[in-house]
Image (tube, grey):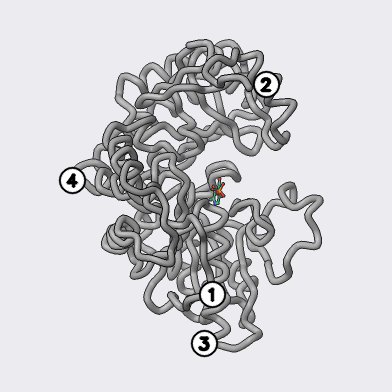
Amino acid sequence: MKETKQMSTDQILLDGQEYVMNTYGRLPMALVKGQGTRVWDSDGKAYLDFVTGLAVTSLGHSHPEVVEAIKEQAEQIIHSSNLYWIPNQVRLAELLAENSFADKVFFCNSGAEANEGAIKLARKYAKLNFGNHKTEIVSLKNSFHGRTLATLTATGQTKYQNYYDPLPPGFSYAELNNSEELDSAVTENTAALIIEPIQGEGGVYPVTQEFIQKAREICDQKGVLLIFDEVQCGVGRTGKLFAHEWFGVTPDIMSVAKALANGVPIGAVLATDKASCFQPGDHASTFGGNFLTTAAACKVMEIMTAEGFLQGVRKKAGYFRDKLQGLADKYGLTEEVRGLGFILGLPVGKIGPDIVRSCSVKGLLINCVGGETLRFLPPLTVSYEEIDEAISLLDQAFGENPAE
Ligand SMILES: Cc1ncc(COP(=O)(O)O)c(C=O)c1O
């Protein structure tokens, strides 16, 4: 057995190809250390991380207070099961409820699981209140909600569904920001409508104010629960604690995950008292809300809700967006920067993957969604100097990869 510390990069890549299932198009590198905005690979090369583990390490890598909370908790107890109360979990539920529309929270381990739980909760609520016909889930085309069978069916992109049929029945789709289509898709058989306030994997497309307001109205008129999937855009990412706060429209249920514990796996379903109809035995998760993950998440919530934190994020994000738009203008890109706060997308066309590769060679990690949109997810704690450095590396990458 090889010690991982002693494995060379070549060995990691070779063994990875031999033993790890081939589910990701990985770059040929392994990250072994992270501190703040910076990560280091197994050859000791440093990078600015504007991917943050896909919107997860929002407070930067190994944030000292989060590390301390994890260490302290690990020394006490890591796991007990939900057969008993878990103090950190109770505290986290309270923090989430105090800082959102929600009254009650269920904890699980990932974004897909949170959406799965949200869908189950909505179906139970609809059955209890309206009868057995009301089971359908409406979602949006180009959305992303996860990889379990129900959530990949809710995901409005067939590329994620190929090979997995028969898919669970009871799902239909409407176009983002098309209120008329939404109105006809939501019927008397609809239990819930699920929307990402900003489509992340789909290419960084925010909802319009008009559409999200209309979605709320349609749901209210037709007795349908509104679910916001804030797995990617929630927990500070947009410069508000939750992205829907920008629009002044609240859901009945919301899923969050990713950044909530800054890297320790977690998922959560937040709901109003009205929608919270689970009873013992209806839904569960062995690891959900365990001591370790909720210790980290309580610390994340404390930091993000501290006075001035999110205000500072909005200011820095505005600075970054202006700089990014400046680059887009310099290189004659025709489409504008999309997104809110620190979830930004820059459509660049076919050169997207080349820019990602060039940036990684130069020491900047970004990624590309939908094949043609560069996505930027820096830590919320990124400094102005690091933003300038990232912009300069991007400038060089654009210089070397002219748009077609
Ligand atoms: C909006 C959204 N929902 C759900 C998921 C699935 O989350 P997970 O990969 O934690 O299951 C993702 C992941 O990218 C996401 O962006």
Q: CA distance from mark 2 to mark 3?
A: 56 Å
> Residue at left 52%, top 51%?
110
Q: Nearer the viewer, mark 1 or mark 3?
A: 1
Q: Nearer the viewer, mark 4 or mark 1?
A: 1
Q: CA distance from mark 1 to mark 3?
A: 16 Å
Q: Give the SS element for disc 2.
A: loop
Q: Earlier in the sequence, mark 2 or mark 1?
A: 1
**At label 4, which amino acid type do we have?**
Glu
**At label 1, which amino acid type do we have?**
Asp
Q: Nearer the viewer, mark 2 or mark 4?
A: 4
Q: Position of residue 251 (x, y in %)?
A: 43, 67
Q: Which residue is mark 3?
A: 129
Residue contact between numbered discs 2 and 4, judged by CB atoms under 8 Å: no
Image vertical order of residue 145 relative to residue 57, above or below:
below
Q: CA distance from mark 2 to mark 1?
A: 54 Å
Q: Residues within 10 Å of mark 3 (few under 14, many from 20)?
A: few
Q: Which corner quadrant holds the N terminus?
A: top right
Residue nearest the observer in this picture, 298 or 81: 81
Residue contact between numbered discs 2 and 3, judged by CB atoms under 8 Å: no
Q: CA distance from mark 4 to mark 1?
A: 38 Å
Q: Give the SS element for disc 4.
A: loop
Q: Give the SS element for disc 3.
A: helix
> Residue at left 28%, top 45%?
299
Q: Position of residue 338 (x, y in %)?
A: 49, 40
Residue 80 in the figure: left or right of residue 144: left
Q: Earlier in the sequence, mark 4 or mark 3?
A: 3
Q: How many marks?
A: 4
Q: Which residue is mark 4?
A: 307
Q: Which residue is mark 1?
A: 282
Residue 254 in the figure: left or right of residue 179: left
